[in-house]
Amino acid sequence: MSTRSPGNPQRVARYVLWFYTLLTAFFGVVTFIDPVRLAATVDISLLTAIARIDFVATYGGSVVGVAALLAYCALHPERVRLGLTATAFYYASYALPRGIGMMLTHGQMGPNAYTLYTLFAIESSGAVISFWMARKMRDFKELSPSQPSTHTV
């Protein structure tokens, strides 16, 4: 199967990885640009310069760093599966505690709850899609005639 085929799992996986790379970078950059407004969407008040610096470092710097890692993986076909797996774990690490917290405090979330539901939807779908595509890449490589078989009979 040609790698230029639009149905090629490797090509689709690379597009998926680029999508989540850009989405992750977007959230990081938005944090750099307007941390106070972004934090307010989840009822966090950044009242001091120290609070703003720490918020930007935590939710801007680390997120952009993860996006850079994902881009590095997306640029190299042999690292796409690794990038998808990293994406899946990254998004799951946000979705799982957010989902548990939302279930435990459902009646107490207040007017900005829609933000949490939106973030949870993005994170959980990102984790599921990325895990699924990483799995598909593994299955494709196992079936590919160009790859030497590592299975013994």
Image (cartoon, rainbow, N blue to C red):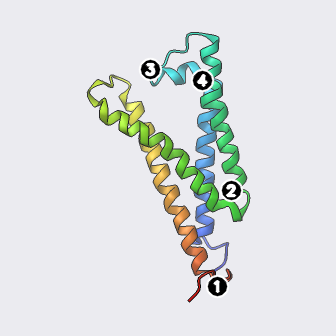
The kind of secondary structure element at disc 1 is loop
How far apart marks 1 and 2 lie (CA) works out to 23 Å
Residue lying at the far top of the rendered structure: 48
The kind of secondary structure element at disc 4 is helix
* Residue 94 x/y as whole percent: 49, 40
First in sequence, mark 3 or 4: give its number: 3
Dots 3, 2 in contact, CB < 8 A: no
Dots 1, 3 in contact, CB < 8 A: no
Residue that mark 3 sits on: 43
Which picture quadrant has residue 16? bottom right
Which amino acid type corresponds to the residue marked 4 in the rendered image? Phe
- Residue depicted at 43% across the width and 38% down the height: 97
Residue that mark 4 sits on: 55
The kind of secondary structure element at disc 3 is loop
Which amino acid type corresponds to the residue marked 3 in the rendered image? Asp
Residue that mark 1 sits on: 145
Quarter of the image with the N terminus is bottom right
Residue that mark 2 sits on: 74
Q: Which mark is residue 124?
A: none
Relative to 58, does residue 3 appear above or below in the rendering?
A: below
Which picture quadrant has residue 81? bottom right
- Residue depicted at 62% across the width and 73% down the height: 5
First in sequence, mark 3 or 2: give its number: 3
How far apart marks 3 and 2 lie (CA) works out to 34 Å
* Residue 115 x/y as whole percent: 42, 31
